[in-house]
Amino acid sequence: MDASLLELRNRTYAAFVGLGRAPSAGELGDEDAVRGGWRQLHEAHALVLNPATDEIRMANPFSAVPTAYRVQADRRWWYANCAWDACGILAALAVDGRIESSCPDCGEPYTVEVRERVVDRPELLFHCLVPAAHWWDDIVFT
Amino acid sequence: MNLFRSEEHIARWLGAKTPGATIPAQTLCDLAHAWWDTRLRPDWQPRTRDENQAILDRLGLVGPFWTLP
């Protein structure tokens, strides 16, 4: 990944965290140039674009759209793309926090507190349906 | 990639779908910290496939299911 693309990637992530939401292309500079860079970052799996709009869909582990995984961290609420990314938001921000979601089977809500990288609900189980070889075949489904 | 109450809930949710892999919530948390902790650092660089695989290996996530392409 060349330096200019890396710089755009880092600026995009910094803006996401600073704003508490995905930045628009126009917020980061020349709209066409930013979208062109984002498309390259999408191809490199460094972020994920909405194919219909070319706006950011995921800056993993952050989600640009509401999901079933809400994370309270660093005095804000975030949406994560999945359970892995919910823990990942806390890891990326290097903070303790709280994950709120519900069992996909029965719908019962749960809260997981993470303090110094330790979860308070160790009995919960993470299920990964898609094998690692196919995670990026359809990353939104994964 | 979901978090469930128990094996029973996973099995019911799966129905006829082929099961994937199940790990405890603490292993997930350990995995997330190993995988994402550099994500916001200004010196971030994309990891290689082998570096990613090494993270999975270190956590005992081995075998065909956890093998990256």
Image (cartoon, coloured by chain):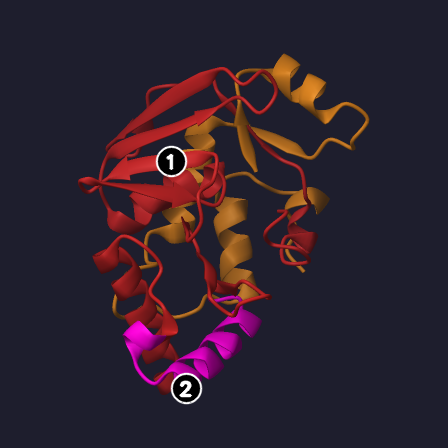
Chain colours: A red, B orange
Q: Quick check: B21 left or right of A78? A: right
| Residue A70: mark in rendering | 1
Q: Quick check: A39 left or right of A137? A: left
Q: Quadrant of residue A107?
A: top right
A70 magenta-colored? no
Position in image of residue A69 (x %, y %): 43, 35
| Chain on which label 2 sits | A
A39 magenta-colored? yes
Position in image of residue B57 (x %, y %): 54, 46
What secondary structure is found at the residue carrying circle 2?
Answer: helix
> Which residue occupies the extreme left position in the image?
A75
Magenta highlight: main SS? helix
Position in image of residue B38 (x %, y %): 32, 58
Q: Quick check: B46 left or right of B50? A: left
Q: Is residue A90 above or below residue A101?
A: below
- The residue carrying pointer 1 sits among few (fewer than 14), some (14 to 19) or many (20 or more) residues within 10 Å by Cα, namely many
The residue carrying mark 2 is A33
Q: Which residues are magenta?
A: A26-46
Which residue is pictured at 30% across the width and 81% down the height? A29
Q: Is residue A115 above or below residue A46?
A: above
